[in-house]
Each structure stands twice: as C-alpha cells, then as structure tokens.
Amino acid sequence: MVDKIISKQNLKELPAQLVEAGFRVIAPKKGAETILFGEISSYEEYDEDCLKPERSIKEMLFPRTEKLFEYRHMRKGKVQLKENEDFAPKTVLFGVRPCDAASLPIMDEVFSWDYLDDYYLKRREETCIISMACERCDEFCLCTTLGLSPASENGSDILLLKLDENAFYARVITPKGEEICSQAEELFDATSDKAPEGFKGPEIKADLEQTSPWLDNNFENEMWDELGLRCLGCGSCTYVCPTCHCFDIIDEGGLKSGARIKNWDSCGFGLFTLHASGHNPRSTQRRRYRQRIMHKFKYYIDKFEYTACVGCGRCIKACPVDINLGDILETINSKAAAENSK
C-alpha cells in the first residue's frame, strides 16, 4: 500500500466527491446538541471538533432494530416471504476515531463464527472506514489500557494523521482504502515521508495480562456484590458500547401478515436469560454485571483471542451511577497483585 498526503482543502472536498461517486458518507454530524453519526453530503456537515459521538459506529453495521423479512399468508396455506433488500449500500464511514474502527475486527468474529450473519457481513463488505487519529483524549478514554493508541490502525482502511494545519498524512491500509484513493485520485499526493508520531494517549490504567487469569479464579469474589448493588441494569453501557452485540429476534403481526424483527438486547437486563420455565440462571444484578466483565475480558479472549473492549469510555460516560470500567480494571490489578504476593 502506498501512503498519501492530502491537504486540508482537498480533504474538505472528499466527502462530496465520494457522494458524487455513489457512496453514502456517514460521519459525526453537526446540528444537534448530542453529536451522533449521520449521513452527510459535504465536509461542512462533519463535526471535526467532536472527539467521539455519543454512540458508536456499531449501529451503521448492526442496526438497533432491523426488519429481516415480512410474511403474508396466502390461499391454500401458502406463505409469501419478502426479504429485506438494499440494506447494504456502498458506504464510507468518515472521521471515525481509531477506537471505534478497532471494534470492527472484534465484531467480525462473532458475526462470522458458527453462523454467517449475512446482514452484518454484507454491510461490512460494502463499508470503508476512514479514521482520524486523535489529538486529545477525555477523562473517559482507555484506549492505551486496551493495547490500542490514538493512532491505531486496527479496523481502518485509511488512517488520517494531522501533519499541520494544512495537511494530513493518509496511511492507506487495505485495498478498500486504495479504492477510495482511486475514486478521488486528484485529491491525494504520493509521499515517501514517515507518518507523524502524534498524540501518545491517556495513561495506562491496568495490565490486562493479569485480568483474565484473575477473573478465571474469582467467579465468586466479593467485588461482584458491590458492583451488583450499584448497577441499575439500565443497559446504557451496552447500547453505547461499540462491541456489545446481544440481540433478540421477535415476530410482530398477526395470523395474516407480519414481520420478523431483530432488536438490540443486553445481558444486563433481567429478562435476557429468563427461561420459559421461569428459571433465570442470572437472576440477580450481581450475576449480570459479572457476566458483562467476564464476557469482555475472559470469555471473548478464550473464544476469539480478542478483548471485547476498545477503551472508548462511552460506558463510563453513560452510566447513571458512575460505574467506571477503568476503576474496575485497576481494582482487579490490585487484587491480582495482592494474591500473587502471598
């Protein structure tokens, strides 16, 4: 891959040129008190000052609610099915932060594991990620703790790093990134320069090498009692998280017609594991919050060799009772160190 230089002026022309080439362009969008990812037609609609939108890019590939197909009963017992079509337009996610981009390889694993989720995978295939390296962080950022950085390449097709007020270094990482450069060839210049080092990122809060082994041996630790008493089970952390992927499928309608709908769900909800018999293996919030941490820092690693967290910090910001994931990881480190010193 050949890295490029793009001037700030040319970067401002890129979204409109991609739209003209037939791409849907999604970016942190100006115009609302709460900044979210939304469709833009020009750079002027892009909020370049936004550190992170309130919600992640997850919903661009894995929507909050999605109609899988509609059904209609016909005569003589026949059923007509109408599948969802045109659900995966060619898309460029523009101005994505590296933590969000890094969530996609993590999500890819679960949606292509024992069952190939065509809806997610088709969208993924048709989506190109142009990420923007961070120049600052906030009090919620944990990317360095999770082994990433403000300029991580994971999941990006092109990574933009600021050279100065007038230009960006464009690290071209994948063939998708090369395709985007070819769509707007006149906007990019070839370079032999090295990429700038950029912002170093937040202080590392915990050593994750200790986290999984400690979790393996502390399923009944008293820490879960304290967290369970605090957690409201509201699901806010799940819905803003770029790697949480639980969903439910329901049929809506009646005898003659209806639709099958896929909706986000959360392991933090009491109904999530409720059996038809009435038994619930995670009947308390203690057990449900433990599952959240175990899944991200133990089970997902065991299954896919990925930590199911990118350190974006949205869960910390969204939590109404100030449960702080960074503090939890620091506590686990402290407990692991105390146990190892005995």
Image (cartoon, helix red, strand yellow):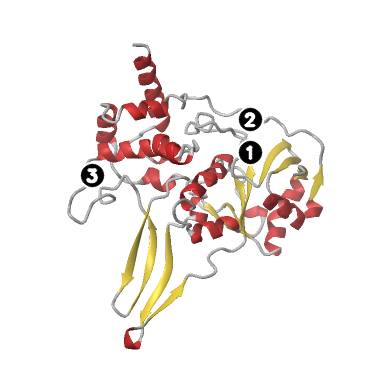
Quarter of the rendering containing residue 224:
top left
For the residue pair 34 and 14, the one nearer the viewer reads as: 14
Looking at the image, is mark 1 or mark 3 nearer the viewer?
3
Question: Rounded to the nearest whole Å, what is the CA distance between mark 1 and mark 3?
Answer: 42 Å
Q: Name the residue under label 3.
A: 281
Please name which of the two marks, 2 or 3, marks the residue nearer to the observer.
3
Is residue 337 visible to the viewer in this orientation of the structure?
yes
**Residue positioned 72% across, 32% down in the render:** 196
Q: Which mark is residue 199?
A: 2
Q: Residue 122 appears in which quarter of the rendering? A: bottom right
Where residue 252 appears, as percent x and y from the top left, is 32, 69
* Element marked by disc 1: loop
Residue 151 lies in quadrant: top right
Assign a secondary structure to mark 2: loop
Give the distance between the C-alpha atoms of the residues marked 2 and 3, in whole angstroms: 45 Å
Q: Is 92 in front, or is 75?
A: 75
Q: Are marks 1 and 2 in contact (CB under 8 Å)?
A: yes
Expressed as whole percent of the image width and height from the top left, the position of residue 45 reads 62, 54
Q: In this view, does 80 lie to the left or right of 150?
A: left
Mark positioned earlier in the residue sequence (1 or 2): 1
Residue 265 point in image, percent of width and height: 35, 52
Point out the image quarter for the N terminus: top right
Q: Which of marks 1 and 3 is nearer the N terminus?
A: 1
Mark linked to residue 133:
1
Q: How many marks?
A: 3
Residue 30 spot, x, y in % from top left:
57, 52
Q: Taking 223 as reference, is 240 above or below it?
A: below
Closer to the camera in the image, 246 or 13: 246
- The amino acid on which the numbered mark 3 sits, given as a three-letter code, is Pro
**Category of crowding for the residue at label 3, using alpha-carbon neighbours closer than 10 angstroms: few (below 14), some (14–19), many (at least 20):** few
Give the amino acid at mark 1. Ala
